[in-house]
Image (tube, rainbow, N blue to C red):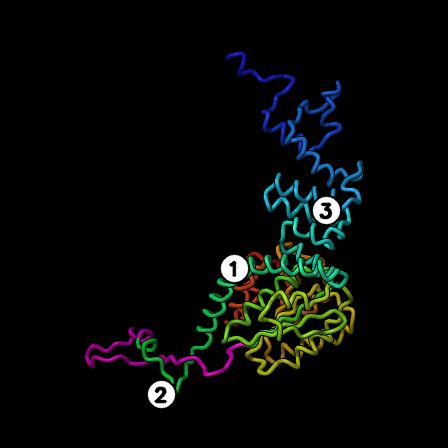
Amino acid sequence: MSQSSLPNPHNPFPETRLRRWRLILGGGAADGICAGSDGLGFSLNSQDAAIDGALSALYDSDRSGGLGSSSPKVARWLGDIRSYFPASVVRVMQQDALERLNLQRMLLEPEMLEAVEPDVHLVANLLSLSGIMPSKTKETARIVVRRVVEELQRKLENPTRQAVMGSLNRAARNRRPRHHEIDWNRTIRTNLKNYQPDYRTIIPETKIGYGRKRSSLRDIILCVDQSGSMATSVVYAGIFSAVLATLPAVKTSMVVFDTAVVDLTEMLQDPVEVLFGTQLGGGTDINRALAYCQGLVRQPQETILVLISDLYEGGNNEEMLKRIATLVASGVQFITLLALSDDGSPAYDHRNTAAIAGFGVPSFACTPDLFPDLMAAAINRQDISQWAASHDISASRSR
């Protein structure tokens, strides 16, 4: 074995690994060996030192001045992290800065708002601050929100359209058509197994008709809790509602609530207006919201009502549960989503989920990429508990 291949007792790790550990651990003890004590013994070059400084300003802010109160310093830091890290990491650091250093003020100044990397969490923060934004900042905020909304629409629109329309087409098939309603092409293909060679004909044992001539085949009502903990769910619900509203075979309504109820259905042609029509924060009155949605139900058997809430009821809890039971008994397909976001399962009221499960309604969190398939399953009246289990989603169920 050559001497060069022997491990260096003073530096047993490859340089790239040492560099990563040094940036992860930060300075202080990690630099200690350079001062004669234990440590990594790795010196940063000028660019890595700048990266280390950006990380320290955020994650070592309790031991140093951090980003301080200087707006130029915050703006410079935002520009630095965008040049040092990929967009996905920048978004995480921005969110950490908002939470750890209480830098909400950076979203109230147009110059700094233009420097941030837009994502769904940033949109949620902007919506929560919209009530106190200066008019100039709100104009910038709308531009940022529209960028995020358009990006999410491009990602979510086709899967939603394909899943929902495919299910509607299947659900609309009329299995007991009158003579003038028969779809002969599909009827013949379905009955080819009944071909009679002697008579050179097919016995149409199963007749398939065209879809029902209705303005909408399903009514979908999204009832969305806009309390602060549901911020990202509100963003995704607004975008999905806008997409569903473009489908002619579906009548979509979007209702948001805290202690008051606001119907945003008329705004669905512009999801940005929908989002700025919400007011994140405040209390929660689920019972009042469901009472309003109950008034929107035209044909219970053709209605899907999606309640998006963590189920912490600030109103009349007993009346809320009775109302859900009544809606389910009437034939409404009721779905409870504890969250519609990428953030995993939130904190929620376990007693209410257990009670609602007793009505045959499971409660679970759903990621945006699965929501189109969930709607397709609901349109086909699949067992939603089984659907959740097939996607490895933990759902509360009746026992």
Quarter-of-image position of residue 16: top right
According to the image, label 3 marks what residue? 97
Q: Earlier in the sequence, mark 3 or mark 1?
A: 3
Percent coordinates x, y for residue 213 in the rendering: 45, 83
Compared with 186, 133 (above or below) is above
Residue with the mark numbered 2 = 179
**Mark 3 vs mark 1, CA separation in Å:** 29 Å
Nearest to N terminus: mark 3 or mark 2: 3
Q: Is residue 396 visible?
A: no
Q: Is residue 235 above or below residue 179?
A: above
Side of 340 where 390 appears, left or right: left
Could you tell me how far apart the alpha carbons at marks 2 and 1 are, in whole angstroms?
A: 42 Å
Q: Which mark is residue 154?
A: 1
Quarter of the rendering containing residue 21 = top right
What is the span of residues highlighted in magenta in the rendered image?
A: 189-218
The residue type indicated by label 2 comes to His
- The span from disc 3 to disc 2 (Cα, nearest Å) is 67 Å
